[in-house]
């Protein structure tokens, strides 16, 4: 099948939670190189709150993104709470009426999340932020003429390439921007966590469509 049911999205969300939990320490290490080192802790806090509240509940993919986004927006510290909260909330709104999600629908959801992000930050591709990971992934979804499974693999590849591109960029926003040229040579923590989340999302959806 080239689609999965919105109603079957719970396992996808829980996979995203696990990706953050498993990489809490690494995200903190990456962030600590040019930031304040709390990215892993804050992300883990938000995703774990979501898991504890909803692991025994039934929810769709869009509903899960909405609940997760609300928690990140309102209950965790740092800059990433509002950023990821906005992405997930806008993606959830775009997908709230979908019964089934294919490449087209997933593209619409993540594009809405990216556009929502653009509404609250000035960062664009090349500015050493998670935009460098998310924007190429959205572009792949929007322009794909391949199967859903193949497209998801392409999304993972584009996300990884975008993440890796931040290593050679100079930070223009956030605490790390104060370092100027000294911010080069280190991955952006937001780009790293975004890649983890997109990978977990893609893997979770791949499993769902293979089971259909």
Image (cartoon, grey):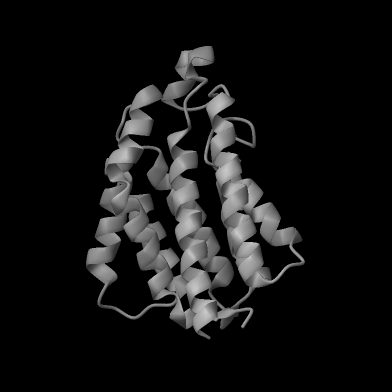
Residue 196 location in percent, x, y? 45, 50
The reply to whether residue 147 is visible in this rendering is: yes
Check the image and report above or below for 153 versus 56. above
Residue 130 location in percent, x, y? 52, 41
Question: Would residue 27 be found to the left or right of residue 199 on screen?
Answer: left
Q: Quadrant of residue 98?
A: bottom right
Camera-side residue of 9 and 116: 9
Q: Residue furthest left?
A: 52
Q: Residue furthest bottom?
A: 212
Residue 167 location in percent, x, y? 53, 28
The reply to whether residue 107 is visible in this rendering is: no
Q: How many marks?
A: 0
Q: Residue at x 51, y 71 (%)?
A: 205
Camera-side residue of 198 and 206: 206
Camera-side residue of 56 and 157: 157
Q: Residue at x 63, y 74 (%)?
A: 102
Q: Quadrant of residue 109?
A: bottom right
Check the image and report above or below for 198 versus 182. below
Q: Quadrant of the N terminus?
A: bottom right
Residue 60 location in percent, x, y? 44, 77
Question: Would residue 48 be found to the left or right of residue 130 on screen?
Answer: left
Q: Residue at x 40, y 66 (%)?
A: 13
Q: Residue at x 60, y 42 (%)?
A: 161
């Amino acid at each position: 099948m080239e689609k999965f049911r919105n109603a079957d999205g719970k396992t996808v969300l829980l996979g995203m939670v696990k990706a953050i939990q498993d990489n809490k320490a690494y995200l903190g290490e990456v962030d600590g190189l040019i930031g304040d080192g709390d990215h892993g802790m804050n992300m883990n806090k938000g995703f774990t709150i979501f898991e504890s509240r909803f692991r025994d509940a039934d929810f769709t993919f869009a509903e899960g993104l909405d609940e997760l986004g609300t928690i990140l927006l309102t209950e965790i510290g740092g800059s990433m709470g509002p950023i990821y909260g906005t992405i997930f909330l806008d993606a959830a709104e775009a997908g709230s009426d979908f019964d089934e999600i294919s490449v087209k629908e997933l593209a619409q959801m993540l594009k809405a999340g990216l556009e929502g992000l653009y509404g609250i930050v000035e960062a664009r591709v090349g500015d050493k932020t998670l935009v460098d990971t998310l924007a190429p992934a959205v572009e792949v979804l929007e322009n794909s003429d391949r199967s859903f499974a193949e497209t998801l693999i392409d999304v993972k590849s584009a996300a990884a390439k975008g993440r890796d591109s931040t290593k050679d960029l100079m930070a223009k926003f956030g605490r790390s921007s104060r370092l100027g040229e000294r911010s080069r040579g280190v991955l952006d923590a937001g780009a790293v966590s975004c890649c983890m989340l997109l990978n977990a999302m893609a893997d979770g959806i791949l499993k769902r469509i293979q089971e259909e």
